[in-house]
Image (cartoon, helix red, strand yellow):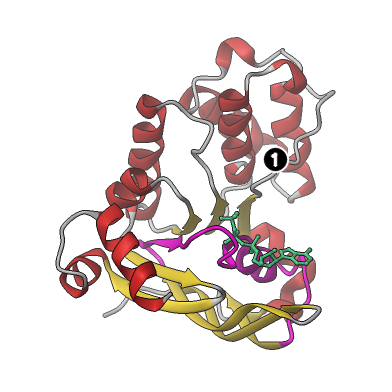
């Protein structure tokens, strides 16, 4: 039996003025899956993630989270989704710990549950010694770790991550890849946009490759490698983009 669909996107079209940023996108994220959203600059990755969260209106199409349309659950959508935006939107004057508590409460997590979760997340992201520091005083890589912890604080089933590791050192990128795999193995679904292809190759089960809003490829990593006759993701990416450009 196939696992449960956490996210279904059907025929998504999004336009800014006369520019179609996303053209008829279909994708699905099931429990246990990490799906990579790849593509050159301006391909429509961030727009797609924002549209799925309900942060921007779409022209056509349907987004379902846990089987419900986004309009149906907009009020609760953020309870089911952990969103890490490309531009981190953390509160600079809160400490690391306060940030986690504040967003956790806002997303509806209970106090007892949060005590445990905040302790766990500070440990997972190696932020314990920074817990009393103001967010604004953290280095960029550490702020990105905190951003990920914030996305996970209410234990959502679906994670939407926009460039989660771009500020992280290679050692930590590998740790995040392992963590996302572990979360998926525990039943979560992850949609992750990234230009970090070595990271994507480690973590993704399935990739969707966009170019100028169009879906150039959608399938497993193995299918992508077979389609472009290589076993290197960077090479497959370059060939796919050249073939459809
Ligand atoms: P990158 O890899 O550079 O982050 P991306 O794949 O995330 O790119 P988007 O940011 O989704 O791409 O942008 C897709 C297209 O939509 C681009 O042509 C961009 O210029 C345009 N675009 C994005 N946001 C807006 C906006 N608010 N108003 C007008 N055009 C926009």
Inspect the magenta stretch and tell me whether residue 228 lies in it.
no
Ligand 1 lies in quarter: bottom right
Report helix, strand or loop for mark 1: loop
Q: Is residue 141 above or below residue 113?
A: above
Q: Which residue is depicted at the point 16% across and 71% down?
A: 226
Q: Which residue is depicted at the point 79% across and 46% down?
A: 106
* Most distant residue in the top direction: 129
6 or 235: which is nearer to us? 235
Label 1 Cα crowd, 10 Å radius (few <14 / some 14-19 / many 20+): some
| 114 relative to 215 in the view: left or right | right
* Quadrant position of residue 219: bottom left
* Quadrant position of residue 152: top right
Magenta segment, which residues?
30-59
Inspect the magenta stretch and tell me whether residue 36 lies in it.
yes
203 or 215: which is nearer to us? 215
For the N terminus, the image quarter is bottom left
- Residue indicated by mark 1: 88
* Most distant residue in the right direction: 93
């Amino acid at each position: 039996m196939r696992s449960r669909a956490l996210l279904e996107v059907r025929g998504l079209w999004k336009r800014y003025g006369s520019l179609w940023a996303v053209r008829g996108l279909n994708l699905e994220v099931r429990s246990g899956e990490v799906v990579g959203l790849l593509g050159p600059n301006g391909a429509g990755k961030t727009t797609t993630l924002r549209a799925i969260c309900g942060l921007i209106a779409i022209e056509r199409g349907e987004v379902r989270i846990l089987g419900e349309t986004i309009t149906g659950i907009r009020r609760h959508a953020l309870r089911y989704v952990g969103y890490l935006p490309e531009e981190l939107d953390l509160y600079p004057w809160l400490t690391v710990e306060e940030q986690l508590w504040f967003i956790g409460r806002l997303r509806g997590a209970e106090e007892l549950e949060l005590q445990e979760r905040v302790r766990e997340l500070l440990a997972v992201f190696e932020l314990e010694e920074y817990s009393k520091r103001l967010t604004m005083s953290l280095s960029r890589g550490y702020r990105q770790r905190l951003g990920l912890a914030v996305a996970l604080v209410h234990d959502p089933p679906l994670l939407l991550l926009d460039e989660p590791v771009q500020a992280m050192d290679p050692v930590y990128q590998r740790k995040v890849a392992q963590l996302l795999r572990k979360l998926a193995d525990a039943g979560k679904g992850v949609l992750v946009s990234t230009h970090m292809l070595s990271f994507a190759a480690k973590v993704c089960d399935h990739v969707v490759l966009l170019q100028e809003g169009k879906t150039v490829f959608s399938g497993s990593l193995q299918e992508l490698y077979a389609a472009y006759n290589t076993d290197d993701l960077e090479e497959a990416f370059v060939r796919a983009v050249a073939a459809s450009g």
